[in-house]
Image: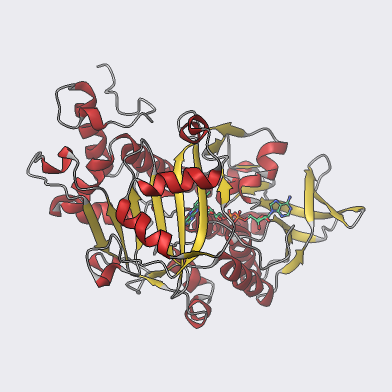
Amino acid sequence: MKPDFDIGIIGGGPAGSSIAAYLAKAGVKCVVFERELFPRPHIGESLVPSSTRVFKELGFLDKMEEARFPRKYGAAWTANDDTKAYNHDWEGMRPDCHAMFRFEERAQVGVDKNYTYHVDRGKFDLLLLQHANELGATVYEGVKVTGVDFSSELPVVKFTMGRKEMGVSVRMVADASGRNTLLGNQLKLKIQDPVFDQYAIHSWFGGFDRGAAAKSNAELDYIHIHFLPISNSWIWQIPITDDITSIGVVTQKSNFAKSKKEREDFFWQSVDSRPRIAEALRKSTRIREFKAEGDYSYAMKQICGDRFVLLGDAARFVDPIFSTGVSIALNSSRFAQKDILGALERNDFSRASFKTFEDTIVLGTRNWYDFISVYYRLNVLFTYFVSDKRYRLDVLKLLQGDVYDEARPEVLEKMKAMVSEVEQNPKHIWHDLLGTLTSDAFVPQAS
Ligand SMILES: Cc1cc2nc3c(=O)[nH]c(=O)nc-3n(C[C@H](O)[C@H](O)[C@H](O)COP(=O)(O)OP(=O)(O)OC[C@H]3O[C@@H](n4cnc5c(N)ncnc54)[C@H](O)[C@@H]3O)c2cc1C
């Protein structure tokens, strides 16, 4: 039986459009089903430099430059400076309540720019989807996939058009449906994270003074992460245009629920715990409705199987504290396309054909997850490591998105060991600062 298309792709976000672009560029007949009409707003606006490799491979970098998205040269983390933890010296490391770095401090293979971008996702996602289309992928917008029928020899992607139920046959499916996790739900693969249950409230603001907590003008175009004195909570500050800044409060869902406040009140109460930022934000103008995001953090029992792969958020969602989501989506396509092309060539679409992809993504997202876990458990440790010459470049490597080539990076092992030490020593000056989110990941194994 001849299929309608070689590959059916569910979703036209960064994962869907990048896999479509890779495959179309290689001459593969593929189709993207996207339920929305682009441009549509989307969360996830700050990129990391490992995205640049994908843009280059897809011939998309010139379009990123032409679009004049704000350039992101670095990142900064700020905290109130009255915490006693910042006056403590440990193993020769001294923390600062203000940590920052520039991407140019560490050269990255295949990334010859010293910056990445902040993007308006409506515009970015549209450009990337159009690029896939120009490379030869068929794109259907406003078409919602309802499921995939795997009962015949070839999978059939089922969708609705108006009131009509239709289907196309394909040789395999790439699910890039984001946190909607279409196949993960259908095949009952989803596992909710036992620890992380974060919740975000965010909006765009015009005329916000990005220097409110910055140390120098060089930092104005950075992403800023502002720690809040409230447990497991922080604010993001992301430039969207010269004038518009995206601001979001991230907290544990239980903090929000306990507060019994309306979204907007909770947002302002959280921001008020950082007075300088609050003052600057109140002087600016909110230009969008407040929006909330929940359903955070899950994994899948498997991210590929006979005739399918899961990409981007459809495969896994880790807390986006380090601006990782779009990079993971793009890089999951970068790794998956190699295995998919091999499967097409051998006409073998069994799960084993996608093993390299699966192993690489599992390793990379595991590293992100460990990094995030350490961060939430003891975030003062993070600024210690960023500020220390011995570890700075190793931390930067992770923050640049280079997480796929090393299981158990040394710097993460060191961080975990230090967390464990603090956990076991109630007299340690940081003991009281331990966050409540822990997966017991740092408890030493009994020998
Ligand atoms: C609060 C928050 C802050 C974040 N901040 C950042 C950040 O700063 N930087 C960053 O890189 N990432 C961030 N992320 C993560 C980022 O949003 C995602 O990781 C990224 O969008 C994943 O891309 P994707 O293509 O996998 O999924 P998506 O971008 O969600 O795309 C999925 C697409 O599939 C479509 N779709 C869904 N179901 C169907 C269906 N049944 N039929 C057809 N189409 C369908 C959707 O309409 C959508 O267009 C953040 C996430 C959250 C929640």
The answer, for residue 44, to whether it is visible in the render is no
Q: Position of residue 99 (x, y in %)?
A: 23, 55
Q: 355 and 85: which one is in front?
A: 85
User: What residue is shown at x 63% (from left), y 48% (from top)?
Assistant: 309
Rendering quadrant holding ligand 1: bottom right
User: What residue is shown at x 26% (from left), y 52% (from top)?
Assistant: 395
Q: Quadrant of the N terminus?
A: bottom right
Q: 173 and 203: which one is in front?
A: 203
User: What residue is shown at x 30% (from left), y 28% (from top)?
Assistant: 442
- Of all residues shown, which one is farthest toward the right? 164
Q: Is residue 171 above or below residue 139?
A: above
The answer, for residue 148, to whether it is visible in the render is yes
Q: Position of residue 231 (x, y in %)?
A: 36, 35
User: What residue is shown at x 22% (from left), y 54% (from top)?
Assistant: 98
Q: Is residue 439 above or below residue 290?
A: above
Residue 219 sits in which quadrant?
Answer: bottom left
Q: Would you say 179 lies left or right of 375 here? A: right
Q: Position of residue 408 (x, y in %)?
A: 32, 41
